[in-house]
Amino acid sequence: MPNDDEIELPEGIKSLAAEYRSKQAPAYFSERVMANAREAGRSKPFLRYASAGMAVAAILVAVVMTPVLQRHSGEPVLMATNPPEPANMAAASLPELPVPGPSKAPGDLSEPLEQTAVLAMADDWLESGSEADVPVLADFDDAVSLIDIPDPLG
Amino acid sequence: MSEPSDRELVRQFQGGDEQAFIVLVQRYQDRVYRLACVRLYAYDDARDAAQEVFLRAYRGLPRFRFQAEPFTWFYRTLINVCNEYNRRRVRDRELKQAVENDPVASNEEYVPQEESGLHRVRACVQDLPERQREVVMLRVFEDMSVEETARVLGCRPGTVKAHLHKAMARLKELAAETAITGGMGSAE
């Protein structure tokens, strides 16, 4: 039946195409593919379990080490045995920020001066890359007291 | 009972039926191997490349989202794998040449006698532009329909026909210049 799809091939190419289509994949090709696929598939669950194991180990280390590190830094260890009341939770978890010295003009949304200075000092420590130089500070007030805050009024 | 479509087989494989994947491999292994033979110079490489295509399919088909036909996925993977093999071969040759100062070996040494038909197909299409070569390989040599070829290549049927028209003009010239069944084998 004549077909719009049909193409007229030169005789040489027609016979070459027929010869081409007679070629087959090597014997046992699919068996070899499946053997290799199963082999590769077997190693995959191992990798999955290994990564899951590493994640669990990381969580355990974090759970064990957090109280130790907190004790070392002098901070009270917060455990879940006596949680604060939900209403007071925000107040309990947030450190009290010192009231900035000079009063700010209405509409001045810039950060408090002390806070800016603390952040600048933290940046310096991070850039220096040396943890030995970083003092252990008990709270925010201590950190503020370390900084020489210029008098904004002159 | 009619055979399951490629999409049905992929869905079955995604549901954990490994036999469905074996059916897919058996359905396309000859086609993928032949296309690899024409794109690569060494038939050992072609066998390995074809196997690599199905191994990637085994890993990738569980995430297949049916935005294209499964064979389109096989074909694009095959092109990528063959390009990787050819790049590696060029690099290895350059390395060998640099170390041993040997002339580049002729491609002929990689072609076993029984595969000379595939060798002549490569000789026939190698001078065509890439897109025309792809159209000729799928439409003429693999005997796929214009629509199938267009789906695999991600273009319109009209584009396939245009490429085919240009390619056939060139192939007819070649057929007239040399007897393809005899003379093209040594053209490479």
Image (cartoon, coloured by chain):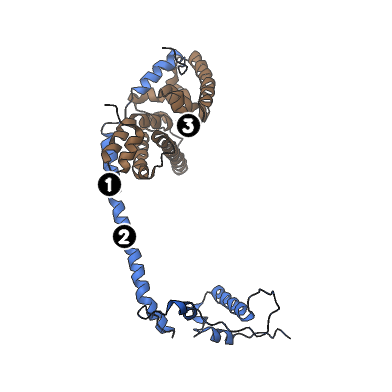
| Residue topped by disc 3 | B153
Any part of residue B171 in sight: yes
Comparing labels 1 and 2, the label whose residue is closer to the camera: 2
**Which image quadrant for residue A111?**
bottom right
Residue ID for mark 2: A50
The chain holding disc 3 is: B
Q: Could you say where residue B57 lies in the image, as x and y percent from the top left?
A: 36, 41
Q: Quadrant of the N terminus of chain A?
A: top left
Secondary element type, mark 1: helix
Q: Residue furthest front?
A: A87
Viewer-proximal residue, B1 or B93? Answer: B1
Q: Amino acid at mark 1?
A: Glu
Give the colour in which the image draws chain A.
Answer: blue
Q: Is B85 or B80 nearer to us in this picture?
A: B80
Picture coordinates of residue A17 (x, y %)? 40, 20
Label 3 – label 1 distance at C-alpha:
32 Å
Task: Please state if B174 lies on the left or on the right of A108 as rendered.
Answer: left
